[in-house]
């Protein structure tokens, strides 16, 4: 193992502009920045890392600071990681009236993940196309503070900067795919999951009574290249949904899986969860897929079907088993592959007031079930909507 003097000499060998006294001052400053929690040896290693000088002996001494080694309160921290999340830039006005910008991202190394907050000019890196998902970057001269959840976050201000590590060993950093599941991969064993995808449906906010006042709930449908899954945001998490809309690319972190009344899995965004808008990976677009009537099978969900209206029945009232009143209307629709009965329930029955026989329509968010006669029927789901003459858009 190299001695302190040997490591200092190696720094001086590559930095002819520095003296031994200069290195000692850098070491003392590094220890001060870390609240005097670093040993002399640890401080020398970090100084060498900042100067991008490799200190090696036969044991390949590590000079890189890992994410797990970051301590709250450090005033001059540098770390390397792969970009696994980039959130949408945020503009704000400070208390003194000055306009500012913040760009948040998450990086990962083999020891863990870290939120990085880029302020000022550094927040423009995404717009300048100098930052992308999957890149390995080195964050220099940041300061570490505790975030709202108590975890360490690295802030990059005027002194700090980001450098792309083109010479980094890819095998030392986890892949983006390691941090989230695909919709098709979710199974009954999953309790808490991370997901990414496009919002393909989103409902209005609903209110309900609870013991300590009013509650809020908002439902949306998350879609990736493998499928779609319903998601539900509760109470304060509805506020995080306020700026989100259809076709936005989002990340759900720590979503909880639950079975709904139909036995289907949903993702619930609760107090410990987050839902955030992301910049989609380069070249990734939401897949617009539709199902032909001849391909319909029992127990399919989240379907889009293009068809033409053949017949519209009357709106009928009925009473549910719990005594509540409901409304229902049935329609016959068809495409070039066949015909199917489409049933609309409750508030969706009002859609028929602007529909006519012969209209070309796009049925969004339908589900199938087997009717009393054994034939497959379409039903409009909770996010359901019908577009008239969709080809005109």
Image (spheres, grey):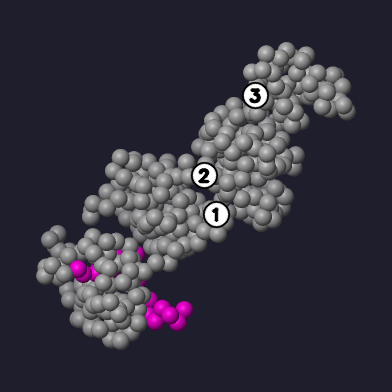
Taking the spot 75% from the left edge, 39% from the top edge, the residue there is 159
Q: Is residue 249 visible?
A: yes
- Image quarter (top left, top right, bottom left or bottom right) of the N terminus: top right
Q: Where is residue 62, by image quadrant?
A: top right
Taking the spot 23% from the left edge, 83% from the top edge, the residue there is 311
Image: magenta residue range: 376-393
Q: Dots 2 and 1: beta carbons under 8 Å?
A: yes
Taking the spot 23% from the left edge, 82% from the top edge, the residue there is 312
Please tell me whether mark 2 sits on a helix, a strand or a loop.
helix
Q: Position of residue 116 (x, y in %)?
A: 61, 41
Q: Is residue 171 left or right of residue 251?
A: right
Q: Position of residue 310 (x, y in %)?
A: 25, 84
Q: Is residue 307 found inside the magenta-colored segment of the image? A: no
Q: Where is residue 180, by image quadrant?
A: top left
Q: Position of residue 99 (x, y in %)?
A: 70, 54
Please tell me whether mark 3 sits on a helix, a strand or a loop.
loop
- Nearer to the camera, 16 or 264: 16
Taking the spot 27% from the left edge, 79% from the top edge, the residue there is 334
Q: CA distance from mark 3 to mark 1?
A: 32 Å
How crowded is the residue under tag 2: few (<14 C-alpha within 10 Å), some, or many (20+)?
some
For label 3, the residue is 62
How crowded is the residue under tag 3: few (<14 C-alpha within 10 Å), some, or many (20+)?
some
- Nearer to the camera, 234 or 369: 369
Q: CA distance from mark 2 to mark 1?
A: 11 Å
Q: Position of residue 48 (x, y in %)?
A: 74, 26
Which callout, 3 or 2, points at the residue further toward the start of the chain?
3
Q: CA distance from mark 3 to mark 2?
A: 24 Å
Please tell me whether mark 1 sits on a helix, a strand or a loop.
loop
For label 1, the residue is 281
For label 2, the residue is 176
Which callout, 2 or 1, points at the residue further toward the start of the chain?
2
């Amino acid at each position: 193992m190299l001695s302190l003097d040997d490591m200092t000499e190696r720094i001086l060998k590559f930095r002819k502009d520095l003296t031994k006294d200069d290195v000692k001052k850098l070491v003392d400053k590094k220890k001060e920045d870390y609240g005097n929690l670093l040993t002399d040896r640890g401080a020398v290693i970090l100084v060498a890392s900042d100067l991008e000088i490799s200190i090696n002996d036969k044991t390949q001494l590590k000079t890189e600071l890992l994410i797990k080694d970051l301590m709250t309160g450090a005033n001059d921290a540098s770390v390397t990681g792969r970009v696994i999340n980039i959130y949408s830039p945020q503009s704000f006005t400070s208390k003194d009236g000055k306009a500012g910008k913040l760009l948040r991202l998450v990086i990962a190394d083999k020891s863990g993940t870290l939120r990085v907050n880029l302020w000022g000019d550094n927040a423009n890196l995404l717009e300048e196309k100098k930052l992308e998902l999957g890149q390995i970057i080195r964050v220099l001269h940041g300061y570490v503070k505790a975030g709202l959840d108590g975890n360490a976050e690295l802030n990059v201000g005027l002194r700090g900067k980001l450098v792309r590590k083109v010479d980094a060993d890819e095998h030392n950093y986890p892949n983006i795919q390691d941090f989230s599941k695909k919709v098709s991969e979710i199974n009954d064993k999953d309790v808490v999951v991370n997901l990414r995808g496009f919002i393909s449906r989103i409902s209005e906010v609903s209110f309900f009574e609870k013991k300590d006042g009013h509650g809020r709930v908002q439902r949306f449908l998350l879609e990736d290249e493998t499928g779609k899954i319903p998601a539900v945001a509760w109470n304060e998490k509805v506020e995080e949904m306020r700026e989100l809309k259809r076709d936005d690319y989002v990340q759900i972190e720590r979503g909880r899986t639950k079975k709904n009344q139909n036995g289907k899995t949903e993702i619930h965004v609760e107090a410990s969860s987050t839902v955030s808008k992301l910049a989609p990976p380069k070249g990734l677009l939401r897949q617009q897929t539709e199902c032909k009537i001849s391909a319909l099978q029992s127990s399919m969900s989240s379907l889009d079907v293009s068809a033409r209206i053949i017949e519209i029945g009357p709106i009928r009232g009925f009473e549910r088993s719990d005594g509540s009143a409901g409304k229902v209307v049935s329609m016959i629709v068809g495409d070039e592959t066949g015909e199917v009965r489409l049933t609309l329930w409750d508030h969706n029955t009002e859609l028929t007031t602007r529909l006519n026989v012969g209209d070309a329509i796009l049925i969004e968010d339908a589900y199938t079930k087997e009717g009393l006669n054994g034939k497959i029927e379409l039903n409009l789901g909770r996010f359901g909507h019908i577009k008239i003459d969709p080809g005109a858009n």
